[in-house]
């Protein structure tokens, strides 16, 4: 009888211990919340509504000034050689002011052959226009002139400019003149002469600066649908 009584007490103790352990495990599980499963109320909504996006876009457009692309030979009535020279001069514009529009006016001093390629000694005048509004109105203008050496190869549709160098900025004439002029000794002497009483006759590649600017604005307005 005593043994049965002790066994019943032991069983009762085991049951109490088991129920207590289960309650503790249930409590631990309820308190654990994964970091990536936080309640939605703790997350800020950064999404933009369509109305907000439209407002932002309108404000950006109001603040934006006209953007003028670089001029291209297709905008002007230029021949194959002249078109290649024009585009090369545009690409070589690496030390000029940050103008709204810059268009090169090009003339040719002379031409010679070297290593199977055509070398053209040019006069380039970059015309700058500031404060442009998309019409032929602007608030200021300026210019930068420089001799240049262009090396062309190919012919017809394959004609391309493989090199276009402006005279080095700040360098003395004797530094670049022999390399640019090659066998054109009269031209070299002209550049080196301290007194240039007469201007060297240039073969024009491009129209006048006024015509270039007019045609650029005309094609720009067609591009934007003005």
Image (cartoon, helix red, strand yellow):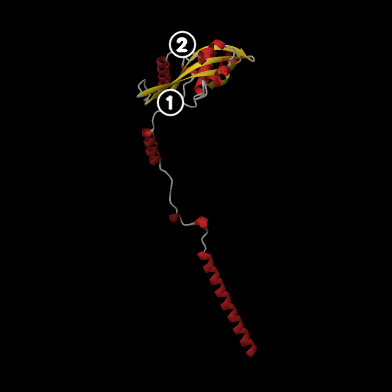
**Going from the N terminus, do you reach mark 2 or mark 1 first?**
1
Q: Which residue is mark 2?
A: 199
Front residue of 23/47: it is 47
Q: Residue 57 in the image: state x and y as whole percent.
A: 39, 36
Up the image or down, 2 lies above or below 190; here it is below
Q: Which of the two residues, 5 or 191, is positioned nearer the viewer here?
A: 191
- Which of pointers 2 and 1 indicates the residue nearer the eye? 2
Q: Could one spot residue 1 in this view of the protein?
A: no
CA separation in Å, label 2 and label 1: 34 Å
The disc placed on residue 68 is: 1
In the rendered image, which quarter is residue 119 located in?
top right
Q: Residue 10: percent from the left, percent from the top?
A: 61, 83
* Image height of 28 relative to 4, above or below: above
Q: Quadrant of the C terminus?
A: top left
Report the side of 223 relative to 17 (left or right). left
The residue located at (61%, 81%) in the rendering is 11
**Residue at x 37%, y 36% (from the top left corner):** 59
């Amino acid at each position: 009888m005593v043994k049965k009584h002790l066994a019943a007490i032991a069983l009762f103790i085991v049951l109490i211990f088991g129920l207590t352990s289960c309650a503790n495990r249930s409590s631990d599980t309820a308190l654990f919340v994964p970091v990536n499963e936080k309640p939605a109320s703790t997350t800020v909504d950064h999404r933009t509504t369509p109305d907000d996006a439209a407002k932002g876009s309108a404000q950006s457009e109001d603040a934006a000034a006209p953007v003028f692309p670089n001029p291209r030979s297709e905008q002007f009535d230029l021949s194959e050689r002249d078109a290649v020279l024009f585009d090369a001069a545009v690409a070589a514009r690496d030390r000029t002011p940050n103008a709204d529009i810059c268009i090169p006016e090009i003339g040719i001093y002379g031409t010679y052959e070297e290593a199977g390629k055509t070398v053209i000694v040019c006069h380039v005048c970059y015309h700058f226009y500031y404060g442009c509004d998309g019409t032929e109105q602007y608030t200021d203008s300026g210019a930068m002139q420089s001799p240049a050496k262009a090396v062309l190869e190919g012919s017809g549709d394959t004609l391309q400019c493989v090199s276009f160098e402006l005279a080095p900025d700040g360098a003395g004439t004797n530094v670049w003149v022999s390399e640019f002029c090659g066998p054109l000794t009269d031209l070299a002497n002209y550049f080196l002469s301290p007194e240039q009483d007469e201007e060297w006759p240039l073969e024009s590649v491009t129209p006048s600066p006024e015509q270039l600017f007019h045609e650029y604005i005309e094609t720009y307005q067609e591009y934007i649908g003005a």
